[in-house]
Amino acid sequence: MPNAVEVKNLSKAYGNIKAVDDISFDVAENEIFALIGPNGAGKSTTLRILATVLTLSDGGASIYGLDVRKQADKVRQIISYLPEEAGAYKNLSGISYLRFMAALFSDEKNKQKEYIDMAVLICGLGNRLKDKVKTYSKGMTRKLLLARTVMTRPRLAILDEPTSGLDVINALEIRKIVRDLSLQGMAVLLSSHNMLEIEFLSHRLAIIDKGKIHDIGTAGQLKEEYSASNLEEVFMKLTINK
Amino acid sequence: MKKFLTLLKKEIQELLTPQMLVPLLVIVVVFVFVGKIIGKETSKAKAPQAIEILDLDKSATSQQVISIIEKTNFLPNVSHSGGAEEVIAKAKEKNAKVALIIPSGFEAGIKNFQPQKMEVYTIMKNFSVMASVNSQILKAALGAINDGLSNQLLANSNPKIDPIAIKQPVLADDFVVIGEKQANISPTLVSGFITSQTTFIPIILFLVIVLASQLIATSIATEKENKTLETLLSSPISRKAVVASKLMAAGLVALLTAGVYLFGMRYYMSGITGGAIGGAAATDEASKAAIAQLGLTLSTPDYLMLGLSLFLGILAALAIAIILGSFAEDSKAAQGVVAPLMVLVLIPYILTMFLDVSSFSSGMKILIWLIPFSHPFMAAPNLLLGQTSSVWYGILYLAFFFVVFVFIAAKIFASDKIFTMKISFKKKRP
Ligand SMILES: Nc1ncnc2c1ncn2[C@@H]1O[C@H](COP(=O)(O)OP(=O)(O)OP(=O)(O)O)[C@@H](O)[C@H]1O
Ligand SMILES: [Mg+2]
């Protein structure tokens, strides 16, 4: 069985800006893997490449053995991607947005219903789902989109700062859901600025800065390696010393 | 296919918002309303108008004058004594807009070949076209009076000669030649007819192209801004379907808008041309026959070609707008990026409206023919003039243009250019 994600010597440049520079990492099945790093480090760029939204400039990447470039169509059937700071269609209601997305992932009515039921349960928006998305708060929109991302039970969920904008209780709830789904066989690749979240959620993490990965390991390993009491210290040591 | 329909439905839902529909409805209501008012006013002007006449001559000739005036759609109220002040006061009282005084000695003067003056008072309450209509009609009546009286004078002095032969020894007989066909009709009537039939086409086409291309560019820019496009392009749907659904939704909305505008304009035009001041509208049977003889009517295939040309023009504009919209980072920038397209549409719109393209130098002509949007603007007059082949050429060119630009748009969506290329109108951060 191939890894959920395999990234080898991946690079991406926007014109002259080298956003991702020769990075490599793997994500195993069932694993929750986190990318952490300062603003502009190249986290979102990496996730967008793996979500087949951007094309890579150099190196290679595959999802469950499928090449993100050559087999993008197949990759799209088994992944689900939540962009950072994403919105939904403003003139659709929450429920019609879920219906619309469900219909994109499956032609079968019962499958669609299954997806929608799951999303309704996860987002916890209740009656507000009937309202237009433009009337939602930032956190409500985020929950709707998160529910949408995992409702299709993708084999890999790519989540760019999944809990940004959520309050403590909602963030906790979402983390629990992500954790449960991963136990049921969903691999997760996420980025975050929240060290607590990463310690709680991720099995392993990579610290990325200026397009390069500086270290990969479990939270425990990294703390020991850098003789730090928490991840924030590790982060500071790694990114400021460079 | 199912997924395409899902996408199409979503696109239409996003486009047909109250913000888009309300202005459209307002425009139509205004058109219908203005058309109705104008129609009402013109039929009012067509109804017999009151006229106050002071006949101080009380002769057979003055009687004849009054009966001619009556025949030219006036309701005269005749009195035989008083002066200018009284007759004006009476006119005001009866709400008549014109008053007329036939002086005493009128008949005798005319018989002695001395030109006579009638005082005509027009009571103006505003300065619109309608306000002067009555005095214009009266002028026509005066023409008829002069004609009748001078005929009489001529006939009295020399009964052997036809008065017409003396007054108008030379007459123009108007013919209009179009291609191989010709007909006995005045050119003013022909151009008046064509204008009334086709002026609204370029206006509607222009409005619809502007609206639809802004809609589609904004839709793409908004999807980029909200990251919904990233979600869409990472979903298991073909990117061609994404482009096609956007095009089709905007195309359908454009058709709807065109239909609505057409309805409004028709209403408006029928209000205007229904009246007497419609100018040279060729409405009588003889003119209609002459216009048909010139081939200046559109057959069903002509209408189909016209529709095809207009629709392809809109589609070509939409294809360009998709590409331009891909450059915009947010919905505000979308209004700016479609500006080049607007220029491309504005040039042929203005040129074909005011100038005769066929008389341009060949270099200019080629330049205009190269702009795809010239063709739908020229389609209606070309069809009327029987130049079907140039309309076909335009249709093929537009289709080619559309296919090429859709292809480019699909390429942009298939690569990551849709996310990486941009024109920012914001100042770059240092
Ligand atoms: N569309 C783009 N065009 C040009 N440069 C870009 C584009 N998107 C990102 N970049 C650049 O690539 C680099 C990496 O950006 P990226 O969005 O991947 O960072 P990030 O790690 O996700 O940061 P953040 O934590 O702020 O979200 C940055 O220098 C950014 O300026
Ligand atoms: Mg980011």
Image (cartoon, helix red, strand yellow):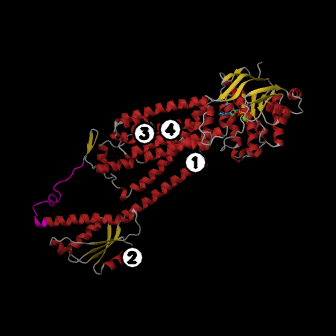
Question: Over which residues does the magenta segment extend?
Answer: B155-174
Disc 3 chain ID = B
Q: Secondary structure at mark 1?
A: helix
- Mark 1 surroundings: few (<14), some (14-19) or many (≥20) residues within 10 A: few
Q: Secondary structure at mark 4?
A: helix
Label drawn at residue B374? 3
**Residue A99 placement, left or right of B320:** right
- Mark 2 surroundings: few (<14), some (14-19) or many (≥20) residues within 10 A: few
The image position of residue A94, as x and y in percent, is: 71, 42
Residue at the spot 40% in from the left edge and 37% down from the top edge: B368
- N-terminal of the pair, mark 4 or mark 1, is 1
User: Mark 2 and mark 3: span between their CA atoms?
Assistant: 57 Å
Query: Same subunit under labels 3 and 4?
Result: yes
Q: Nearer the viewer, residue B35 or B243?
A: B243
Q: Secondary structure at mark 3?
A: helix
Q: Are marks 2 and 4 in contact (CB under 8 Å)?
A: no
Q: Nearer the viewer, residue B232 or B274?
A: B232
The image position of residue B171, as x and y in percent, is: 19, 53
Looking at the rendered structure, the kind of residue marked 4 is Ala
User: Which residue does the numbered mark 2 point to in the structure image?
Assistant: B93
Query: Which residue is most to the bottom?
Result: B82
The main secondary structure of the magenta stretch is: loop
Looking at the rendered structure, the kind of residue marked 3 is Ser
User: Which residue does the numbered mark 1 point to in the structure image?
Assistant: B20
The image position of residue A82, as x and y in percent, is: 72, 34
**If the image is split into quadrants, where does the C terminus of chain B sit?**
top right
User: Mark 2 and mark 4: span between their CA atoms?
Assistant: 60 Å
User: Mark 2 and mark 1: span between their CA atoms?
Assistant: 51 Å
User: Mark 3 and mark 4: span between their CA atoms?
Assistant: 12 Å
Disc 2 chain ID = B
